[in-house]
Amino acid sequence: MVEFRKLTYEALQVGEEFVSDEHLVTPEDVETYAYAVDDHHPWFSEASPFGGPIAHPTLLGNQALRLRHGRYIVHAGLHAKMEFEFLEPIRPGVRVRSRGRVIDKYERRGKPYMVTEFSTADEQGTVLVRGRFTQMLFRD
C-alpha cells in the first residue's frame, strides 16, 4: 500500500522528481476543454495546418500541476507564476506523460513557495510542452 504524506514545505525536497500517469488524449478531452475555456477554434474539431485536429495548447497544463498528487496529499495552494513553452501540437489519439522536478523552494514574506519544472512528452519521447510553475503552499 502506498502511503501519502501531506505536502508541506518541510517535507518537500529540492531535486525531488515526479512522473504522471500516462494519459490518452481523446477527441472528447479536446471538445470538453474547448468548451471549458470557451475557445471553439475550428482547428480543435476540423483540419488544421498540422495535419488534422489538434488540442488547445494548454490542455495538459493540469496534468503537470497534478504531478505531486501521486506521492502527496496536496491541499490548496496559490499559483504565483506559470510559464509554458509549446513545442509541438497535441493531437487526439496521442498518449502523453508529464515529468517534473522541484528546482527550488524558498520563503518570501513568511510564505513558503516551491518551483517545479516539467515537460510533457508523447510515447516516442517527443516533448510537446515544457514549463515551470511557482506555487505558494498554505501552512496549517
Image: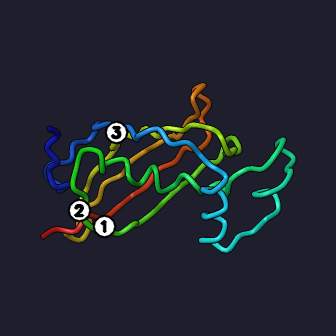
Q: Considering only vertical position in the picture, is 128 above or below 31?
A: above
Q: Residue at x 53, y 40 (%)?
A: 120
Distance CA(mark 1)–CA(mark 2): 10 Å
Distance CA(mark 3)–CA(mark 1): 18 Å
Q: Considering only vertical position in the picture, is 40 above or below 14?
A: below
Distance CA(mark 2)–CA(mark 3): 20 Å
Q: Where does label 1 land, which residue?
A: 77
Q: Residues within 10 Å of mark 3 (few under 14, many from 20)?
A: some
In what quadrant of the picture does the N terminus appear? Answer: top left
Q: Residue at x 62, y 49 (%)?
A: 26
**Where residue 18 is drawn, which disc sits there?**
3
Residue nearer the viewer, 94 or 72: 94
Number of the front mark, 1 or 2:
1
Q: Residue at x 67, y 52 (%)?
A: 27
Q: Amino acid at mark 3?
A: Phe
Answer left or right for 138 relative to 47: left
Answer left or right for 17 relative to 21: left
Residue 126 in the image, given as x and y percentages of width and height: 62, 30
Q: Amino acid at mark 2?
A: Pro
Residue 92 in the image, given as x and y percentages of width and height: 68, 45
Q: Where does label 2 land, which residue?
A: 112
